[in-house]
Amino acid sequence: MKGAAVRIEHLTKLYPDGTRALDDVTFEVQPGDFMVIIGLSGSGKSTLMRCINRLIAPTSGKIYIDDVEVTALKPEELRALRRQIGMIFQQFNLVKRSHVLTNVLAGRLGYVPPSWALTNYFPSELKDQAMKNLSRVGIPEKANTRADQLSGGQQQRVGIARALMQEPRLILADEPVASLDPATSHSVLKYIEEMNKEDGITVLCALHFLSLARRYGTRLIALKGGRIVFTGYPEDIDEGRFKEIYGEEAVEVEIA
């Protein structure tokens, strides 16, 4: 029987200055879940996401993706695994001077010969695939526009289309709407939700606002000071749980 899509065992990250960003974190994400990680800024959300795809190395603990131990992979094995993990970043991570279509095609760089990447060569079938993914996120007309001429919401949609080009099994979305206004936040998260529901892609998404986590998450994890303080379902977080996660003085903000 197939195991968890993601399994984290006793993960700890200690930075050189003594900061314990993650402290004995253990949890599982089941295939097809839209798991949301919530918590205040500095709670460890981004560190956790970056450890999972090994952008940074954990101090101790183990990470499994589809029962493969990521923390034990050699560099070439890790590169192969990363092709199947789509990353959606808070700051979009686009090549601002390049056209939108080129940024989307970058999602296939892990699959094409290095010489193609150096010469910016992509066959017509990949360009057609990129255009289909831009259509899925509602901006096919922006294909030949420079990325730096787009709004923040449009740039994040390009990031989603780029992730779709990887045909990933797992999406890691690290605060994907932190730089966006409330209305745009919902439009972006709905596209990620569509990937989850229609394509069956497992999603692990870090969010700051509980109202967004309640709307989109099938399960939630709350971090505080690098430790898990809640694991469960969105409806299980009452006012008491909210105060425990965000602090006694915190007031819940609805993102309509």
Image (cartoon, rainbow, N blue to C red):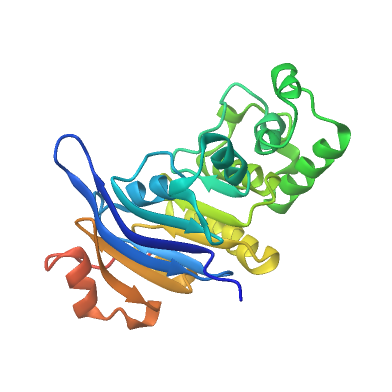
Residue at 35% in and 48% down:
46
Compared with residue 238, is residue 79 higher up or lower down, i.e. above or below? above
**Residue 252, position in %: x, y?**
26, 68
Q: Is residue 240 visible?
A: yes
Establish if 206 lies above or below 217. above
Q: Tell me what residue is drawn at x 65 percent, y 32 percent.
A: 103
Q: Nearer the viewer, residue 73 or 82?
A: 73
In the displayed structure, 57 sits above or below 254; it is: above
Query: Residue 202: percent from the left, percent from the top?
Result: 57, 63
Q: How many marks?
A: 0
Q: Is residue 164 left or right of residue 247?
A: right
Q: Residue at x 53, y 46 (%)?
A: 87
Looking at this view, is 21 or 183 the one in front? 21
Residue 78: image quadrant is: top right
Question: Is residue 254 shown to the viewer in this render?
Answer: no
Q: Quadrant of the C terminus?
A: bottom left
Residue farthest top in this picture? 119
- Quadrant containing the N terminus is bottom right
- Residue 217 x, y percent position in the rendering: 46, 70
Q: Is residue 12 left or right of residue 141?
A: left
Q: Residue at x 62, y 62 (%)?
A: 201
245 left or right of 95? left
140 relative position to 184: left or right: right
